Image (cartoon, rainbow, N blue to C red):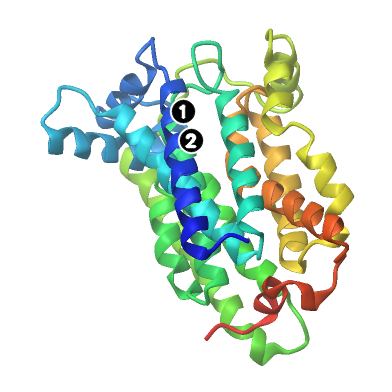
Amino acid sequence: MLTRAAALLEAAVVILIASAQITLRSEDPNATALAGVLNVLNKTGGDLNQYRPLSAYIAYALQQLVGSDIPPFQAIRFAQCALLFSLAYIYYGQLNLHPRWRLIGIALLIGLISLQLGIRGPGGFSLDRFFDTIFYLMAAILVLSNHDLWLPALIAVAIANRETAVFMPALILARYPLSRDLVRQRRPLVIAISALAVAAIVYLGIHLYYGPHPRIEQSYFGPDMFLHSLDMPGQTAFFVAAINILPILAIVVLKDVDPFLRRLFWMIVPLWFAIHIWAARLGEGLMYLAPLALILVPLVLQGLERRLAGLGDAPAANAATVAAQARPG
């Protein structure tokens, strides 16, 4: 059995190597990352990019801090990966996954991310999508640590990075499902509604500040977008590479996982996939990184771990089940 110190050391080594590997894959030969940052700073970004200013301003602030001519994109990517994988390790631990299973989860994320990056990958540099996943993992850790009062403040920052942060209140609702016990449910419900209200205020404020920004390329939605994606070489292949067989495995083991993960799956995954398939290129797999890291990967790992251990859905077998039913402190 691994001691705690040995497990943490092993995790740190894996995270550092993983972060370096993803950083090496984060090539940007056409300088699209720089163009994206400059477009936001110059207020020439198209809809929806102009309304996602946080990552661009973080990049610009770090550029000023180090006195460089351009933002330190490689250093930012390394820091993003180190933070993302560290938060995933902590969050998966809150779900009571064994340290080795947590490392398997990180390895899955490395593979899924790597397939979308590089010269042949369709994902681009995608600063905001990495930050989006980081914010979601932070929100999950706060909720499972009884610090969900911080969620409205976190979503105020996260919504300025990407509008998909609007799903964050589902974390509270997944942990504390509605019941007849209105006294018990009042606090998490108020926090979830407050987080949505804060997100709406920040989102509208950003739109009012920047004003209308038409898209800088031809837009497709609905069936047109889906058919347009199918007409583009490699789109289907990259989509399958991004999500792999995780959704299928998730359905298979769904009954074996904590109620928190089951509810979170149904609250977020179907709608997230439907929206992005409806309104985005099919092959841009990094758009699915947040639900993959937050829900699909830990759900599949928890289900498989329990099945292999013969634990099934026994509540006493997992401390996360108790945590998922507890009231915030």
| Residue wearing tag 1 | 21
Q: Residue at x 37, y 26 (%)?
A: 45
Q: Looking at the picture, tell me which residue is in the foreground, 89 or 12.
A: 12
Q: Which mark is residue 74?
A: none
Q: Position of residue 166 (x, y in %)?
A: 55, 53
Marks 2,1: beta carbons within 8 A = yes
**Quadrant of image for the N terminus:** bottom right
Q: Secondary structure at mark 2?
A: helix
Q: Is residue 60 above or below residue 174?
A: above
Q: Position of residue 172 (x, y in %)?
A: 61, 69
In this picture, residue 298 sits left or right of residue 210:
right
Q: Is residue 141 above or below residue 60?
A: below
Residue found at x 65% / y 59% = 98
Q: Dot 2 corresponds to which residue?
A: 18
Which residue in the rendered view is the most extreme toward the front? Answer: 1
Mark 2: amino acid? Ala
Q: Position of residue 198 (x, y in %)?
A: 44, 63
Left or right, 106 with respect to 72, comes to right
Q: Residues within 10 Å of mark 1 (few under 14, many from 20)?
A: some
